[in-house]
Image (spheres, helix red, strand yellow):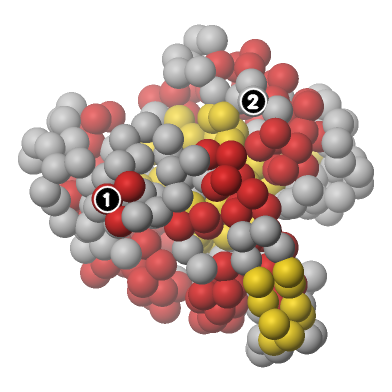
Amino acid sequence: MVMLRNPVGYNHCGSQEDFLVMKFGLYLPNFGPYGNARLLSDLAVSAEQAGWDGFFLWDHITRYWPTDVADAWVSLSAVAARTERMRLGALITPLPRRRPWKVAREALTLDRLSNGRLILGVGLGSSGGSEVEWDNFGEEMDLKRRAGMLDEGLEIVNGLWSGEPFAFDGKYYHVKTSHFLPKPAQQPRIPVWVAGNWPHKAPFRRMARWDGMVPQTSPGIDNDMGELKEAINFTRSLRDPALPFDVAYSLPPVQAASKAEAYAEIGVTWLLVQLYPTHFGADWQETWPLEAMRKFIETNPPKL
């Protein structure tokens, strides 16, 4: 974690108004050679020792080619048990593919296991190639319906985390009065980060109702800065500026190292470094350079 003068006046997460906090996390796939919960927890231990602030996993259940896949939530439980400081979470969990009450229970259990380090990242799920993880299993394919399921699902998760009797009667989900205990370790709730694609405005209005945003912009390091700034400003304009709010954005290792300060200046609070084989000279379906990827983790996070 590093601090620099705040050029945009945001008061983020209780920090002094004159400063922005930039945190650095690792962003790893949960398949291929990383489809191994024991290996992922080993890497998390190395990451914490090296000074990384967060450890985040993709949340896939299968891929387009035959390959190992590790359940992200079970893997994060192993990470939580072996680390003490780093934030952790799945980015993103497609909530419309899950039962909200099951996610609520899993999340509060993992939050307590980690002593209050979980971040819940949610979204609609990828629209590209959805047949592999959605249609093949009879899941909802219509994105508008998924959006409704996401909104209702978040209300249910948040309500069950309250520790008070909770009931819900929506279009997609119905919950008779239920009482979930214990409460999560973090109060008033586990931070919820919401993902979405700019320039579509609806997901960013949704982000503004929660605790953080995971925006996706047009690909390309040279042309995404303007779009990202626009997306951040739009979302922040819908919020009370005094309330904490995170902006998490992922970049390849080289760009993360060279552009960190520029991203901090437009309001990014978490820079997630993509630990993908494609950034280390290999294709997804080729042999991954695991030793080089591990050494990258051990060389410490980028610095401003």
Q: In the rendered image of this protein, does residue 1 appear above or below residue 168?
A: above
Asked whether residue 53 appears in the rendered view, the answer is no
* Residue occupying image coordinates x 69% and y 86%: 178
Query: In the image, 104: left or right of 252?
Result: right
Numbered mark located on residue 200 in the image: 2
Q: Position of residue 89 (x, y in %)?
A: 50, 59
Q: Nearer the viewer, mark 1 or mark 2?
A: 1
Q: In the rendered image of this protein, does residue 242 appear above or below residue 167?
A: above
Q: Disc 1 versus disc 2: distance between alpha carbons?
A: 27 Å
* Residue occupying image coordinates x 58% and y 39%: 144
* Residue occupying image coordinates x 34% and y 55%: 138
Whichever of callouts 1 and 2 sits on the residue coming sooner in the sequence is 1
Amino acid type, mark 1: Asn
Asked whether residue 140 appears in the rendered view, the answer is yes
User: Label 1 neighbourhood size at 10 Å, few (<14), some (14-19), many (20+)?
Assistant: few
Identify the element where label 1 is drawn: helix
Q: Position of residue 125 (x, y in %)?
A: 46, 44
User: Label 2 neighbourhood size at 10 Å, few (<14), some (14-19), many (20+)?
Assistant: few
Judging by the rendered image, the residue that carries numbered circle 1 is 136
Q: Quadrant of the C terminus?
A: top right
* Residue occupying image coordinates x 18% and y 36%: 284
> 19 or 10, which is in the foreground?
10
Q: Position of residue 18 (x, y in %)?
A: 86, 37
